[in-house]
Amino acid sequence: MISCPEIWTEFFEKYYSEEINNLAFRIKSGGDKRAIYVNFIRDLSVFQEGRLGEELIENPDEVLTHAEKGLASSTNIYGVSLEGCKPRFHSLPSTKKIMIRDIRSSHISKFIAIEGIIRKVTEVRPRIISAAFKCLNCRNVIQVPQDDSTLRYPYECRCGSKRFHLIPEKSISIDSQRVKIQEYPENLRGGEQPQSIDVILEGDLTGVINPGDRVIINGIVRAKPRGVQQRMLTHMDLFIEGNSIEMLQQEYEEFEITEKDKEEIMKLARSDDIYEKVVRTIAPSIYGHEDIKLAIALQLFGGVAKKLPDGTEIRGDIHILLVGDPGVAKSQLLKYVHRIAPRSVYTTGKGTTSAGLTATAVRDEIDGRWTLEAGALVLADKGIALVDEIDKMRKEDRSALHEALEQQTISVAKAGINAILKARCALLAAANPKLGRFDRYSPIAEQIELSPTLLSRFDLIFVMTDEPGEERDKQLASHILNMHQLGEMLEKFKGTNIKEDLKSKISKIEPAVDPELFRKYIAFSRNIFPVLSEEAKQKIEEFYVSLRSRVKENSPVPITARQLESIVRLAEASARIRLSDTVSAEDVERVIGVVQRCLAQIAVDPETGDWDIDYAYTGTSKKQRDRIFTIKKIIEELEDLNENGAPEEEIVSKAREKGIEESKAREILSKLKMMGEAFCPKYGFYRIVRRR
Ligand code: ADP
Ligand code: MG
């Protein structure tokens, strides 16, 4: 026996009279959120020893009807009818929270809670809940309640006719939306595929969640036979009929950090060699690359996001790009970070089946509705996105990525879908050179398939080359071989006494900080918001000014405000590693070292040896740009002296007078032609293309 509607009225009047009055007021003033939110654990499970709660879990269909009736009969001070208002239940006890992968047939028709990240949402469209049919014979109108996705017709009219016509304007519809909720990426053990389940949301629950949102959904588990055209199978598909949504704002709350953990973290943060320890915790199986490991550590801890008084937002997340030869452990590094980061999503740019990096809007193949699906950067919101082979990403992602990396949002406006998705994540990406191997004498911009503007969004770009060198090769070989030799032994002798000489070998390939603790350490550090000290500010300023002051007219730009912001972010991250709330001068020195070594790899014009940030991002050095400018000027001067344009030989000799070598001049001429800046009216003659 389940409780009758009167008991529910009693419950509502006892615990929710204020909410009911508010609801009545909303209805009176034409509002449309016609629902009451009931706190399950606080109120329902104490009222009458929790009987109503238990009934709801076991018999949600009947109980929800009774609760709705009970709510409708509750009195309110405005005397407004509460007919059709929905009771919605949230905050279920944790025992009723089921993992998506654990939903079984025993849960069918039960009320449960699931938690996860929203992967896909369809546009909101009306669904008929009561269809009006007109009899084609006697014109009689019949209402047929609808509770399935296929339209149900009346069987027969009272006149005996079986031919009907649907009248949409007399049918009753409700807003409806289907979303897909998926397990959190961070709760999966390596290699596991995330499981997901569809949720149907109706009425006031529609249009409120976006892909990437982390939510709890409370609702009823439903099963639907799988239909293959006319044949129905006995295998069922499960989905959830949503009753309520709880939005979660969690940062890293899923980490339980005990007092003991906290003590250990504090102790670590105070140790003198914490930065070395941290570096030795990032991918110890990979030999060398200390700068990259330090950069990754800084990325994991992250800078501080800021909102300026004028509303501008500055990201705290640090983006890193690894470019380099095949087989230098780029992919390995990414996979390692995936395992160790508190929240991360791993994907590769060439995955064609996945939703890509940003977001995709596609038509659903089943019901033709537009569906918005979250890509990796959305799913990694408030974490880190690991994208291997980013140079192979889809065309759509290329344009969306600019916004995603700087504003940390992804705007979608397509068909019935208008959304701004959040992508507040750090990006660690790897790219391979176009021609297979990296040529350190050519600019990286020419060697990888990423646009200059996109390259400039990365705080740090590392070039990883595989250059033979006897000493390094020997060390690397011994490191890799040790790993192969000891990897298994370590498993076997876990916890037992190991000989001293083995111990020292092992310490080189074991993480310096236990990965579980490291993850908590990172999560814990995120609650600290370091601020630049005066000395730190001064150090950064000095660095910036010293580089900029070398800039005379016509010389390259060594560094821009963008790098300045990067240094601030990195220095804040460095302070976070110490759990310090001030950024010290040492923090700044540490990160300037990394930034300098990074820029030395990519932003030094090999011709002049000068630092040149344009050379890094566009592949064209300041000097080269000046030369191009000079040659264009020469063509302009000469082109009108001859009916066919400027003769090549004359251009070359004039260029030589201005200090441009012959080979360079000819190279620039062919470049100008290729880029459509100049053309040849006749072989060996040049004119400038003038655009109006
Ligand atoms: P990439 O993605 O750069 O092409 P991978 O990550 O697939 O390269 O690495 C190829 C293999 O070489 C991996 O098994 C990796 O462990 C090994 N390797 C390369 N460089 C190192 C290194 N410095 N230390 C340890 N192993 C390395
Ligand atoms: Mg690879």
Image (cartoon, helix red, strand yellow):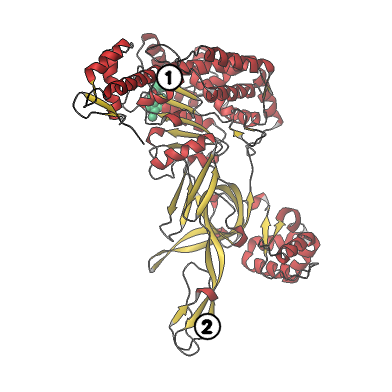
User: Which residue position holds label 1?
Assistant: 602
From the viewer's side, name the closer residue of 48 and 415.
415
Q: Nearer the viewer, mark 2 or mark 1?
A: 1
For image coordinates 49% across by 50% down, the residue present is: 413
Q: Of helix, strand and loop, which one carries label 1?
A: helix
Give the label on residue 656, or none: none
Q: Of helix, strand and loop, which one carries label 2?
A: strand
Q: Which quadrant: the C terminus?
A: top left
For image coordinates 46% across by 20% down, the residue present is: 613
From the viewer's side, name the closer residue of 214 and 585.
585
Side of 602 relative to 564 (left or right): left
User: Which residue position holds label 2?
Assistant: 141
User: In the rendering, at what x and y percent does residue 588 appear?
Assistant: 60, 17
User: In the rendering, at what x and y percent does residue 345 appear?
Assistant: 50, 37
Q: Quadrant of ligand 1?
A: top left
Q: Is residue 3 above or below residue 57?
A: below
User: In the rendering, at what x and y percent does residue 324 appear?
Assistant: 39, 23
For image coordinates 69% across by 28% down, the residue present is: 262
One can see residue 297 in this view: no
In the image as oriented, which residue stretches furthest toward the left? 683
User: In the rendering, at what x and y percent does residue 417 appear?
Assistant: 50, 53
